[in-house]
Image (tube, rainbow, N blue to C red):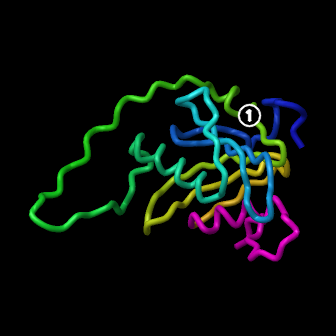
Amino acid sequence: MPEGNNYTGSAQWYISAPNDVAVCIDRLAGRRITGRLYHRYSTEAIPFLTGEQVVYRMEELFDRLRFPYAATSERTFGGEKWAHAPAPAVQECVMDNRELLSKHGDLGTFIIRVRHRQNSSWQGAVTWMEADKTVQFRSVWELIKLIEGAMDTGEEVERVSWTDDK
């Protein structure tokens, strides 16, 4: 368990890619998680009221960064030609890794590293800081189930294991 907002933790506590985020869970109401999201391009917390909302906020960041590049995209059909997306605006880092890792939720903190956006989903790794565990996930659904399982709401939910022996 991290002591305070202490950077010195496990070797699993790291930020390595431009799109890595810290998800801080502050409250539970049934299966509804609420909290804050942090990334290196803003010092402001991005609040969320549901697990789905945190996914949308992260997807917006990835689209803005164009990283990881989405293997599938929205398509339109008709008389319009598909246009190439404009180059992403240069994003300036305003929060360093130490500061980002110092953010903690009242109930739990997760470092999420999305490496790929393939098959209309995400693949990557998630670190649950309080348990000092990191596992790989193969879809957004699996990521949400890992976070819900870590929060152990007491309700019967489909669990995904925090052991990496899938």
Neighbor class of circle 1 (other Cα within 10 Å; few <14, some 14-19, many 20+) is many
Residue shown at the point (79%, 46%) measured from the top left: 26
Instruction: Give the image location of residue 70, x and y in percent.
Output: 39, 56
Q: Is residue 27 left or right of residue 47?
A: right
Q: Is residue 128 magenta?
A: no
Q: Is residue 19 left or right of residue 136?
A: left
Q: Secondary structure at mark 1?
A: loop
Front in this rendered view, residue 123 or 95:
95
Report which quarter residue 22 is drawn in: top right
Instruction: Give the image location of residue 19, x and y in percent.
Output: 52, 42
Front in this rendered view, residue 74 or 132:
74
Q: Is residue 72 left or right of residue 56?
A: left
Residue shown at the point (78%, 38%) measured from the top left: 104
Residue shown at the point (66%, 56%) measured from the top left: 50
Instruction: Give the image location of residue 125, x and y in percent.
Output: 63, 55
Residue shown at the point (57%, 31%) measured from the top left: 40
| Tag 1: amino acid | Lys
Front in this rendered view, residue 160 or 60:
60
Instruction: Give the image location of residue 126, x and y in percent.
Output: 67, 53
The magenta segment: 139-166
Image quadrant occupied by the C terminus: bottom right
Image quadrant occupied by the N terminus: top right
Q: Is residue 155 magenta?
A: yes
Report which quarter residue 13 is drawn in: top right
Q: How many numbered circles does the render carry?
A: 1
Look at mark 1 in the image and give the residue it sits on: 103
Q: From the viewer's perspective, is residue 36 above or below residue 135?
A: above
